Image: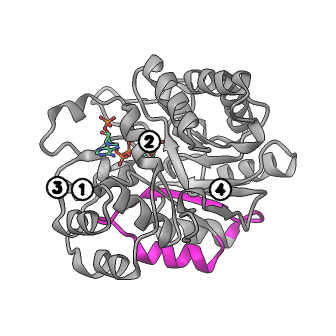
Amino acid sequence: MTSPDTLRYTRIPLTHGTGAMPAVGFGTLIPDPLVTTQATKTALEVGFRHLDCAERYRNEDAVGDAMQAVFKAGTVRREDLFVTTKLWNSNHRPERVKPAFDASLRRLQLDYVDCYLIHTPFAFQPGDEQDPRDASGQVIYDREVTLIDTWQALERLVDDGHCQAIGLSDVSLEKLREVVAAAHIKPAVVQVESHPYLPEWDLLDFCKEHGIVLLAFAALGHGLDPRMLDDPVITGIAQGVGKTPAQVALAWAVQRGTAFLTTSTKPARIQENFNISTLPEDAMREIREGIATNVRFNTVVHTGVPGFIPRTNDQERERPHG
Ligand SMILES: NC(=O)c1ccc[n+]([C@@H]2O[C@H](COP(=O)([O-])OP(=O)(O)OC[C@H]3O[C@@H](n4cnc5c(N)ncnc54)[C@H](OP(=O)(O)O)[C@@H]3O)[C@@H](O)[C@H]2O)c1
């Protein structure tokens, strides 16, 4: 008798924080709040135990409602969940960090989060406007605060017992090195775009060497062109192992040692994305060696301004954030 495949239950212990992150994560970047609550609730019901949130998504309260629903139903306990949220660019000034963190907790209806990330390394003009622009439409950056100043404010949250782990998002390897060198609490997690078309092997090597979990967003390539899920290497493996292309890409993410975030508003896909199984080693090798396409879909890493690059789908232009 073969033992059941446990890949979907993989948990990655945090070297620089408390607890362990479930490798299989559900992202809550969903524009409509009612759809957010419904999709998040479905994700929790099918087995996701890791939720990714952000003040920038403007729907933390809707995610909170989904969590409250499963807590009240008794199907999931708070301690079984790993919840991450993120500090937005307009709150980088150290004195704004704790109030922003508290506001996220209030909206999420939680008394702690498992991980708090700096959403991007770019500081915007401080204030309640998330997207401050000058008269010519240019983003107003805040030159008075450094990433290290903001990092130290996050360290204080951990020191004072308000959250279990802290990390960064949308950083380059260079920026990550700077923070690691200056930190008294090193980043537990780094969240960046990553998928078979953007494997970020150098960043992953650095993260492994320094005990940092690499959390891959857009693990399915955000459904944009060129469609990674239609890549012949991915579809060929999927056919061979009797799984879907999405399940192949997600299993690859976990087996190479990352956690991942995926998002869907469709119950069948949410279930599909949870039901991953271990790929044979030759499939892992084939994805690494047989795919030459290299595409970054999200430009946020260059500017701090959210957004997937629209390629063929004009509707992407309308998406509010990302
Ligand atoms: N740190 C950052 O700056 C940042 C930026 C972007 C995202 N994120 C986080 O990462 C999460 C995931 O990002 P993402 O939305 O780009 O993830 P993704 O899973 O790569 O892309 C989601 C897209 O794929 C489709 N999809 C989902 N499951 C599928 C399946 N099994 N087969 C085919 N298509 C499928 C979805 O459409 P349907 O809804 O129609 O199924 C949706 O259009 C976000 O929710 C957010 O939490 C962080």
Res. 271 mark: 2
Most distant residue in the right direction: 160
Mark 4: few, some, or many residues within 10 Å (few <14, many ≥20)?
many
Question: In the rendered view, would you say 151 is above or below 172?
Answer: above
Question: In the rendered view, would you say 5 is above or below 246?
Answer: below
Determine whether the residue tagged by mark 3 lies in a helix, strand or loop. loop
Is 215 covered by the magenta stretch?
A: no
* Residue under numbered circle 4: 21
Q: Mark 1 vs ligand 1: CB under 8 Å?
A: yes
Mark 2: few, some, or many residues within 10 Å (few <14, many ≥20)?
some
Q: Nearer the viewer, mark 3 or mark 2?
A: 2
Res. 226 mark: 3
* Residue under numbered circle 1: 229
Q: CA distance from mark 3 to mark 4?
A: 30 Å
Q: What's the residue at 69%, 68% (across, down)?
A: 182
Res. 239 mark: none
Q: Is residue 181 left or right of residue 120?
A: right
Q: Amino acid at mark 3?
A: Pro
Q: CA distance from mark 4 to mark 1?
A: 26 Å
The span picked out in magenta is 182-211
Quarter for ligand 1? top left
Determine whether the residue tagged by mark 4 lies in a helix, strand or loop. strand
Mark 3: few, some, or many residues within 10 Å (few <14, many ≥20)?
some
Which numbered disc, 3 or 4, marks the residue that appears first in the sequence?
4
> How many numbered tags mark residues here?
4
- Looking at the rendering, which quadrant does residue 15 occupy? bottom right
